[in-house]
Image (tube, rainbow, N blue to C red):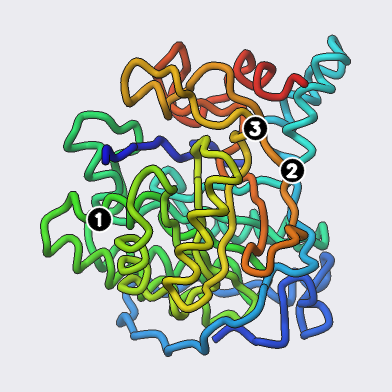
Amino acid sequence: MKKQYFTRATYWLAPLALTCSLGASLACGGSSGAKSAKAAKAQRPDPQAPLVEPPIPAPVTTNPLQGAKLFVDPQSLAMLQANNLRRTDAAQAAVVDRIAQQPQGLWMGEWNSDIFRAVQYFVERAVKDGSVPVIIAYNVPHRDAAAEGADAGHSAGGLDSKEAYMRWIRDVYAGIGDNAAVVILEPDALPGLKSMPEDWQKERLYLLNDAIRTLRQNPKVAVYIDAGHAAWVPAEEMAEMLKGAGVEYASGFSLNTSNYRTTEECLEYGHQLSELTGGKHFVIDTSRNGAGPYLEAKNEEETWCNPPGRKIGQAPTTQTGDAVVDAYLWLKRPGESDGECNGGPKAGVWWMDQAIQMASP
């Protein structure tokens, strides 16, 4: 089976309590509003402090997103574009609003020069809105090694050492403070695992385990490890990778991040993985799967890098009607390019033509 490589990032700046979901975090001691946000503000970690192994959290057995209000970012590229269009083209603004008015994740990686402050700023804005932010952590060493080796990736990068990543993920944790948040952990990291040398594989699994334990020291952070999609890695193989990465202590796993596979296909694959991992829950990226994958592609890159004719998918919701599906999320932001392919600009750059095509009924 051929692997598929994806561009991920939006390059712009602007133990879980079993009785407490993110949606009920206020009742469980969470915070909301400007006054609470100030009280929740954390201290920046000392970059010279010894790295301490985080404690093992209790396994997650419930849906941590039940009842959560997800954050709609008023500073997203889609919202800024829609606001500009309102002055000149109300009809086109209404189309872009079909993207802008939906809660979407924010990608965090090496383009954030101060990751602690970037996370803190994003989370504080969500807290003031009384909502829960979704963060995609995307900075693991050898991040897109499989794609880079095949000269097929637009997302090669990541930090250059184990220690650097451990400190980076602790800055993410500190930036969140004691607020509620959802973290999607390292898209592609597991699907691309077997393409790397064995020592890199061991390091990656160690770092994912460490990241889960670090982030879940905050009982209001839900962590989902990215598990690719059904057309990439067979379920039995992916289940073993998830176990090796510490999914037991995560909230679950994520599927279809930045991709176009149908929700139905993801549900089937997700249920297989859930059964193979002791009933772990999952979330699905439905941001751009409204028309499913591009089946007329002439080569592999055309299937994932700005394929034509794609549509936005089901709106984000935490009410899925499925006991093991915690949410449908928009992780890749529609309208932001996959990379310099099929006529698109660089990864993460707003592409109006694509946005209008995706969001038009």
Dot 1 amino acid type? Leu
Rendered location of residue 340, percent (x, y) = 40, 19
Q: Nearer the viewer, residue 229 or 246?
A: 229
| Vertical position of residue 233 compared to residue 341: above or below | below
Q: Which residue is mark 3?
A: 290
- Please give left or right for residue 132 compared with residue 153 in the image: right
Residue at 51%, 58% (x, y): give it.
270
The image quadrant that residue 299 belongs to is top left
Disc 2 versus disc 3: nearer the observer:
3
Residue at 44%, 17% (x, y): give it.
296
Rendered location of residue 338, percent (x, y) = 46, 28
Secondary structure of the residue carrying tag 1 is: helix
Dot 3 amino acid type? Gly
Q: Which residue is mark 2?
A: 315
Residue at 34%, 37% (x, y): give it.
5
Q: Which residue is mark 1?
A: 193
Is residue 270 visible in the rendered image? The answer is yes
Q: Are marks 2 and 3 in contact (CB under 8 Å)?
A: no
| Vertical position of residue 265 compared to residue 80: above or below | below
Q: Nearer the viewer, residue 74 or 256?
A: 256
Q: Are marks 2 and 1 in contact (CB under 8 Å)?
A: no
Dot 2 amino acid type? Ala
Rendered location of residue 352, percent (x, y) = 64, 17
Image mark for residue 240: none
User: Which of marks 1 and 2 precedes in the sequence?
Assistant: 1
Disc 3 versus disc 1: nearer the observer:
3
